[in-house]
Image (spheres, grey):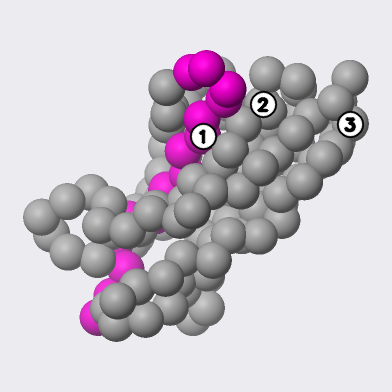
C-alpha cells in the first residue's frame, strides 16, 4: 500500500503564504507525476498544478505566478508554495501521485484544509 501524508495547511490572512507538503511512503518502485488539486465548498475538485518526473510543471491558468509546485525525489515529497493568497483559494487541497504508466495518478491524499481569511 501507499500512503500520502499532507501537511502545512491552516488559516492564513489575505496576502499571506503557505507551503503544503505531501510525503509518499509505502510500496512503490518509483513516482512519476505528482500533482495538487483543490475543492472549495460547493464546488467540484479542480486542478491546481502538476510536476512530471523530469521536473516539467504546469498550472491552472489563474494560479500561475502565485503558486509553485516542486518535488524532492530523495524524500518522495511534493510541495506547493502558495503566495499572495486570496479568500477564493480557500479549499481542501489534495495531493496525488502516479506510480504506474496506466493512470496519471494512482494514489490520492486525504486532503488538507487551507483557509484564507479577510
Q: Quadrant of the N terminus?
A: bottom left
Q: Which residues are magenta?
A: 29-43
Query: Are discs 1 and 2 less than 8 Å apart at CB?
Result: yes
Q: Secondary structure at mark 3?
A: strand
Q: Which residue is mark 1?
A: 38
Where residue 117 is drawn, which disc sits there? Answer: none
Q: CA distance from mark 2 to mark 3?
A: 11 Å
Q: CA distance from mark 1 to mark 3?
A: 18 Å
Q: Nearer the viewer, residue 67 or 91?
A: 91
Q: Which residue is mark 3?
A: 13
Which image quadrant is residue 2 in? bottom left
Q: Does residue 70 show up? A: yes
Q: CA distance from mark 1 to mark 2?
A: 9 Å
Residue at the image point whose x is 58% and y is 60% from the top: 6
Q: Secondary structure at mark 2?
A: helix
Q: Which residue is mark 2?
A: 89
The answer to which of marks 1 and 3 sits earlier in the sequence is: 3
- The crowding category of the residue bearing disc 3, from other C-alpha atoms within 10 Å (few below 14, some 14 to 19, many at least 20), is some
Q: Is residue 34 magenta?
A: yes
Residue at the image point whose x is 52% and y is 78% from the top: 75
Where residue 71 sits in the image (x, y, percent)?
51, 62
- Most extreme residue toward the front is 42
Q: Does residue 77 show up? A: no
Residue at the image point whose x is 32% and y is 58% from the top: 107
The answer to which of marks 1 and 2 sits earlier in the sequence is: 1
Which SS does the magenta portion mostly show? loop
Amino acid at each position: 500500500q501507499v500512503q500520502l501524508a499532507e501537511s502545512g495547511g491552516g488559516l492564513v490572512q489575505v496576502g499571506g503564504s503557505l507551503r503544503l507538503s505531501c510525503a509518499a511512503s509505502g510500496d512503490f518502485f518509483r513516482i512519476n507525476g505528482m500533482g495538487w488539486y483543490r475543492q472549495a465548498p460547493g464546488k467540484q475538485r479542480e486542478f491546481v498544478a502538476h510536476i512530471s518526473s523530469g521536473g516539467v510543471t504546469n498550472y491552472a491558468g489563474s494560479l500561475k505566478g502565485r503558486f509553485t509546485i516542486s518535488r524532492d525525489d530523495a524524500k518522495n515529497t511534493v510541495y506547493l508554495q502558495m503566495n499572495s493568497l486570496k479568500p477564493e483559494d480557500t479549499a481542501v487541497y489534495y495531493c496525488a501521485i502516479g506510480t504506474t504508466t496506466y493512470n496519471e495518478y494512482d494514489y490520492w491524499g486525504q486532503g488538507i484544509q487551507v483557509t484564507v481569511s479577510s
